[in-house]
Image: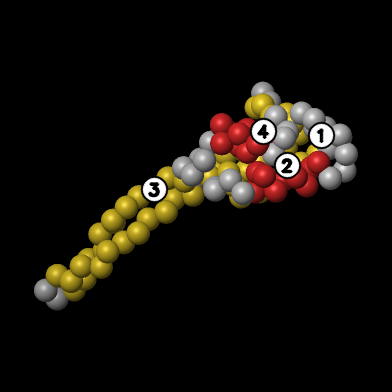
C-alpha cells in the first residue's frame, strides 16, 4: 500500500508548522480475468487496449493461450466491474477468476 500525504505550511510567529491536509490510502489491486472469445493473435492487443483505457489501470498482461488478463489497478479510481465492462464493450466478455 502506498500512502499519499499533502502538507500545508503554516507560519507561527517564529517558525513554521506542517499540518497534514489530506491523507489517502491508495492500494494497488491485482486481479485475474477470464476473457472469452479470444481466438487469434490480435485479440490480446484489443483486450489490452480496452483495459488500459480504464482510468486507474496501471499494468495489463493478456495471454491468448490461457485466455486470461492480469490487471493491476488503483482501487480508489476503478473497480472490477469497470474492467469487465471495458472488455465486454471491446467484444470480449470477461469475469473475475478466483
Instruction: Give how far apart the Cα atoms at labels 3 and 4 are.
Output: 31 Å
Q: Nearer the viewer, mark 4 or mark 2?
A: 4
Instruction: Give how far apart the Cα atoms at labels 4 and 2 are.
Output: 9 Å
**Residue 20: image location, x then y, percent:** 29, 56
From the viewer's side, name the closer residue of 28 and 41: 41
What residue sits right under mark 3 in the picture? 24
Instruction: Give how far apart the Cα atoms at labels 1 and 2 are.
Output: 9 Å
Of pointers 1 and 3, the one earlier in the residue sequence: 3
Q: Residues within 10 Å of mark 2 (few under 14, many from 20)?
A: many
Pointer 1 with pointer 2, Cβ within 8 A: yes
From the viewer's side, name the closer residue of 17 and 47: 47
What residue sits right under mark 2 in the picture? 47
What residue sits right under mark 1 in the picture? 38
Name the residue furthest bottom: 14
Of pointers 3 and 4, the one earlier in the residue sequence: 3
Assign a secondary structure to mark 1.
loop
Assign a secondary structure to mark 3.
strand
63 left or right of 13 in image:
right
Residue 79 visible in rendering? yes
What residue sits right under mark 4 in the picture? 88
Identity of the residue drawn at 65% across and 44% down:
51
Q: Residues within 10 Å of mark 1 (few under 14, many from 20)?
A: many
Amino acid at each position: 500500500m502506498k500512502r499519499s500525504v499533502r502538507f500545508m505550511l503554516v507560519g507561527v510567529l517564529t517558525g513554521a508548522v506542517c499540518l497534514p491536509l489530506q491523507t489517502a490510502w491508495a492500494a494497488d489491486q491485482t486481479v485475474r480475468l477470464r476473457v472469452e472469445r479470444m481466438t487469434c493473435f490480435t485479440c490480446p492487443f484489443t483486450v489490452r487496449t480496452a483495459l488500459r483505457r480504464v482510468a486507474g489501470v496501471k499494468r495489463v498482461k493478456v495471454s491468448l493461450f490461457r485466455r486470461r488478463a492480469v490487471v493491476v489497478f488503483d482501487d480508489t479510481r476503478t473497480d472490477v466491474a469497470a474492467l469487465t465492462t471495458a472488455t465486454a464493450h471491446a467484444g470480449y466478455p470477461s469475469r473475475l477468476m478466483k
